[in-house]
């Protein structure tokens, strides 16, 4: 890869897809970087169904396949939004040598002592989920798994309140039922390892006007497992790629220069 060119790999949040990054991708590419935005299983244009997902590895499979396709000397910056922090941490646990840094964007950032969903369950109090729909489906071994489909009213109030109305409409059309990663039964009960995931550089970007994972909860997540660097986009809602794409890209370009 050319000098000074960074390969970014983007991991979307729950119910969303690679489409979440449509504003950010061209800005970073215009700056000379390479961008891969993936659809996790049963997300975006993935042809898999949510009922086929039996584990966190199943859900994360498209991300793991992309990372395994890169050469041994290629390093990427993973950018994980919201619940995408859990698949990103799994990827770092499996491919630590391929990841230059993980950027946790108002995200669940697992530690190395507790199960993957612990920080969300511990630090983010239960929100009134309004018109969000929950289901469950049977699995091969550990009983039923839970699913979530974000409701349009919930998204408007808690996720997209500062984003353009067009982007909220896009989300209403494109969100899909996903595994409910906030519960341990898909994330699993085994912590990610200190020597693998724990060795990867982590950066956290706080979104100051997030109505879902509020700023004080983001700071609790940060204090639980200190990253190397903390940045902040003050006027961003939970969807900074829509509400503050230029500011988000400025942060990512700074990270690309540094790591």
Image: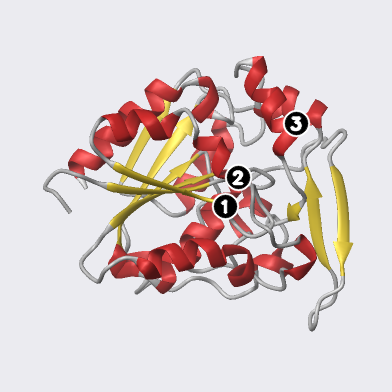
**Which numbered disc flags the more N-terminal residue, 2 or 3?**
2
Q: From the viewer's side, name the closer residue of 207 and 133.
A: 133
Tag 1 near tag 3, CB within 8 Å:
no
Q: Residue furthest bottom?
A: 141
Q: Is residue 233 left or right of residue 132?
A: left
Element under disc 2:
loop
Per the rendering, the mark at residue 172 is 3
223, 26: nearer the viewer: 26
Residue 187 is drawn in which quadrant? bottom right
Q: Are marks 1 and 2 in contact (CB under 8 Å)?
A: yes
Residue 180, position as x, y percentages in the image? 74, 55
Q: Earlier in the sequence, mark 1 or mark 3?
A: 1
For image coordinates 32% across by 36% down, the residue present is 252
Q: Label 1: state its secondary structure.
A: loop
Residue contact at pointers 2 and 3, CB within 8 angstroms: no
Residue displayed at 51% across by 24% down = 208
Q: Is residue 66 left or right of residue 199?
A: right
Cα–Cα span, label 2 and label 3: 12 Å
Q: Is residue 197 visible?
A: no
Q: Earlier in the sequence, mark 1 or mark 2?
A: 2
Q: Which residue is mark 1?
A: 39
Q: Residues within 10 Å of mark 2 (few under 14, many from 20)?
A: many
Judge from the rendering whether residue 80 lies leftward or rightward of residue 102; answer left or right: right
Mark 3 secondary-structure assignment: helix
Q: Which mark is residue 17?
A: 2
Taking the spot 31% from the left edge, 35% from the top edge, the residue there is: 29
Residue 132 seen anywhere in this rendered image of the structure:
yes
CA neighbours of label 3 inside 10 A, class few (<14), some (14 to 19), many (20+): some
Q: Residue 209's x, y, as percent?
A: 56, 22
| Quadrant in which the N terminus is drawn | bottom left
């Amino acid at each position: 890869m050319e000098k000074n060119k960074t390969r970014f790999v983007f991991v979307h949040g729950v119910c969303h897809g690679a489409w979440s990054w449509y504003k950010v991708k061209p800005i970073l590419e215009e700056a000379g970087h390479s961008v891969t935005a993936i659809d996790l299983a049963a997300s975006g244009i993935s042809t898999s169904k949510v009922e086929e997902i039996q584990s966190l590895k199943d859900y994360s499979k498209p991300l793991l396949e992309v990372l395994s396709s890169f050469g041994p000397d290629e390093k990427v910056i993973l950018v994980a939004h919201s619940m995408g922090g859990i698949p990103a941490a799994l990827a770092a646990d499996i491919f630590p040598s391929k990841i230059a840094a993980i950027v946790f964007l108002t995200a669940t950032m697992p530690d190395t002592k507790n199960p993957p969903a612990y920080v969300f369950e511990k630090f983010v109090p239960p929100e009134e989920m309004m018109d969000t729909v929950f289901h469950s489906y049977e699995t091969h071994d550990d009983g039923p798994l839970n699913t979530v489909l974000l409701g349009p009213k919930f998204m408007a109030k808690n996720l997209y309140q500062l984003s353009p109305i067009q982007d909220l409409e896009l989300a209403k059309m494109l969100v899909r039922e996903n595994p409910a990663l906030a519960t341990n039964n898909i994330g699993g009960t085994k912590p990610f390892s200190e020597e693998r995931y724990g060795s990867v550089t982590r950066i956290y970007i706080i979104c100051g006007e997030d109505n879902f994972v509020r700023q004080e909860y983001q700071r609790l997540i940060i204090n639980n497992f200190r990253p190397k660097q903390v940045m902040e986009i003050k006027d961003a809602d939970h969807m900074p790629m829509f509400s503050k794409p230029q500011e988000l890209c400025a942060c990512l370009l700074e990270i690309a220069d540094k790591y």
